[in-house]
Image (tube, rainbow, N blue to C red):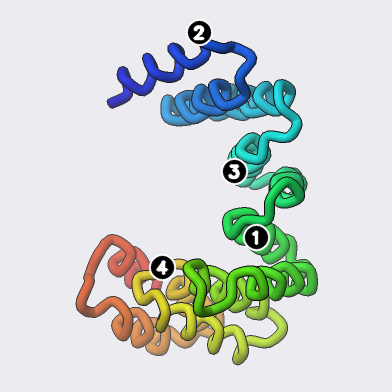
Amino acid sequence: KGDELNQLALFALNSDENNANSWLAFSHLLEFNGDHQRALQTARKALLLDRASRRGFMRHGELRMQRNDTKKALTAFTKAHQIHEGIDSYTEIVKCYCLLEEWQMAEGFAAKALLVFPPDSEHGALSLTLMGLALRAREPQNAVEFLKKALKKMPEHNEALGALIDMRIKEDDFDGAEAILREYREQSQDFFFWMKLGEI
């Protein structure tokens, strides 16, 4: 419903052009239309209007990640995290540190996420996954345990399963990678199943 989305975003801007959220909505619209450069500029505009906009910093970080600008994305996510520590900011910060191969920083944030969102909490599977991602390079066996715990809590969690499969692929253990995929997805041969099977 692109036309309706366009009308809503423009209506929001016309109602209050100094509202950061209106510019963030417009940023999503621009991205939807394939104009990624202007989407980023519009997210910056939102932050100029409201330097305490957590949504603005998260949005800015997302758009930076799309451009593979990990360091600038990390800066944006960190600012959002300073405003409020949410599972979304923990997730993005850990992923950024993993991409930058700063494993100790990734582990530190993952450990804090586990304290704030313990395994038995609503976001427990996500915090377990973050620890698994952070430990992959330094302690692969422990990483596997954390990722399997995440999958036990949330079997449909593609990120944890994808990380487990990728670890096997990196070790050239393709049979092991396929066995893990089929263990968790044999009954649900969805888009993710076929994509990962193709990669293997």
Say whether disc 1 or disc 3 marks the residue closer to the N-terminus.
Answer: 3
Q: Residue at x 28, y 66 (%)?
A: 194
Disc assigned to residue 90:
1
Say whether disc 3 or disc 4 marks the residue closer to the N-terminus.
Answer: 3
- Residue 192 percent location from the top left of the image: 33, 64
**Quadrant in the picture for the C terminus:** bottom left
Q: Is residue 108 visible?
A: yes
Decide if residue 40 is on the left or right side of residue 106.
left
Q: CA distance from mark 3 to mark 2?
A: 26 Å
Q: CA distance from mark 2 to mark 4?
A: 40 Å
Badges 3 and 2: C-beta atoms under 8 Å apart? no
Kind of residue sitting beneath label 1: Tyr
**Quadrant in the picture for the N terminus:** top left
Q: Which residue is mark 4?
A: 158
Q: Which residue is mark 2?
A: 14
Q: Residues within 10 Å of mark 2 (few under 14, many from 20)?
A: few
Q: CA distance from mark 3 to mark 4?
A: 19 Å
The quadrant in which residue 38 appears is: top right
Q: Which residue is mark 3?
A: 62
Kind of residue sitting beneath label 2: Asn
- Residue 63 percent location from the top left of the image: 60, 38
Closer to the eye: label 3 or 2: 2
Q: Residue at x 34, y 68 (%)?
A: 198
Say whether disc 4 or disc 1 marks the residue closer to the N-terminus.
Answer: 1
The quadrant in which residue 53 appears is: top right
Closer to the eye: label 2 or 4: 2
Badges 1 and 3: C-beta atoms under 8 Å apart? no
Say whether disc 2 or disc 4 marks the residue closer to the N-terminus.
Answer: 2
Kind of residue sitting beneath label 4: Asn
Q: CA distance from mark 1 to mark 3?
A: 13 Å
